[in-house]
Image (spheres, rainbow, N blue to C red):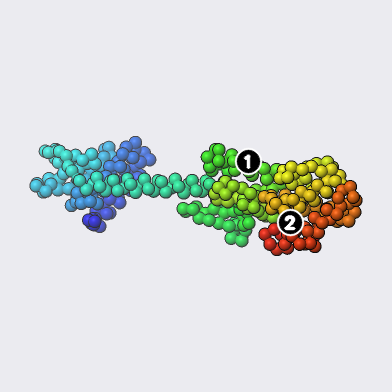
Amino acid sequence: MKKFIVEETEKNSILEMHKSLMKEQSTNSTGTESNADLGKLRNAITVGCLKNGSLKRRSSNGEVFYRKPSAQQPSKQVDFYANMTFKFEDGSKSGKWACPQLANLEASQAAAQQITQQTTADIESKIATEIKKNWKKLETLRQEGADLNTLDKVYDKQVIGNVTLYRPKGQSTTFTPNTSTSQFNQEQLDFVDKFEGLGYKLNPSRIEQSTMVKVSDKELGAPSDLFPNGLVMWYNPNTQSTITRNQDTVLGDILDNQDINKAACRKNIEDYFESFRRQAVADPATVNKAKKIVQACKGQYYGRWGVALQGNKLDNYLDILSGNKGGGPTSYGSDSIWRLR
């Protein structure tokens, strides 16, 4: 590639002209046009089409041109303009000038500018997406009154382009609504809504997280392609539903059974045992809630069911689920979630 060298005096002339034009832009309506002309003439200097002269600007109208001695008549000065015309200073001659190398340079500059604009757009899009995930810019934290002296201790940070984003440590979800096609996004929201209805939370506070358990989209039984970037939700394992009234069991959606009063315990135990036996796909919070009910039933009614409720069968189920008989869930294996005390 040809290397172009601009003389130091030429550099200074270009800089002075550029400064002058920048000042003029605020008051002269032709400032933008003059600046564009200056750029084109500077490119012509860079590629070697204009040399042995200097950039000028007419005080009357701000017109930019390049003046150099005529090659054939050195005693005369020739002015070259960005519209590819020239005129002798004394008016004796005019015409057009050419610079084939100029087109290549301008094409390269246009391509570089397009790449820069695209990169900027990509960065801005990425920042907008991360802000939806509760990342914040420094100025936002400042407006919210955050203690900037504790940023490194309290916040995670990431840098996108030349922008630094912050988010409280431990606060994360890889699911961002409204970043997919409308149909796909609705399927994601329906899934999230379903589990929020079961008591799950998408983004609990750090204080809430201390008493909660997090589960992934896979553990919740989501289709493998529903959340390409993953999903994290949280539930409180200490939440326990009442079983004192006639209602569906917590595993009713899976096994489609119902229960009432003392018989509610029987149905819950039967559903729980059958769910374990089938290795039914159920989310951890639902299993945990069912386990609390079955565990409570064991503590209250074990050995005291009576013949009408098939007590021997229920006690047998409870023994298997508790590990007192073979064939039940292990203490530490993949099926340990079903193990009773």
* Camera-side residue of 29 and 286: 286
Q: Residue furthest top?
A: 29
Q: Is residue 207 visible?
A: no
Q: Residue at coordinates 60% horizontally, 57% vertically from top-left?
A: 155
Q: How many marks?
A: 2
> Is disc 2 surrounded by few (<14), some (14 to 19) or many (20+) residues within 10 Å?
many
The Cα–Cα distance between marks 1 and 2, rounded to whole angstroms, is: 27 Å
Look at mark 2 in the image and give the residue it sits on. Answer: 338
Depicted 260 relative to depicted 296: above or below: above
Relative side of 266 to 113, left or right: right
Q: Name the quadrant of the C terminus.
A: bottom right
- Which mark's residue is nearer the viewer, 1 or 2? 2
Amino acid type, residue under disc 2 in the picture: Trp
Relative side of 160 to 230, left or right: left
At mark 2, the secondary structure is: helix
- Report x, y in % for residue 175: 58, 48
At mark 1, the secondary structure is: helix
Q: Residue at coordinates 61% horizontally, 48% vertically from top-left?
A: 222
Look at mark 1 in the image and give the residue it sits on. Answer: 190
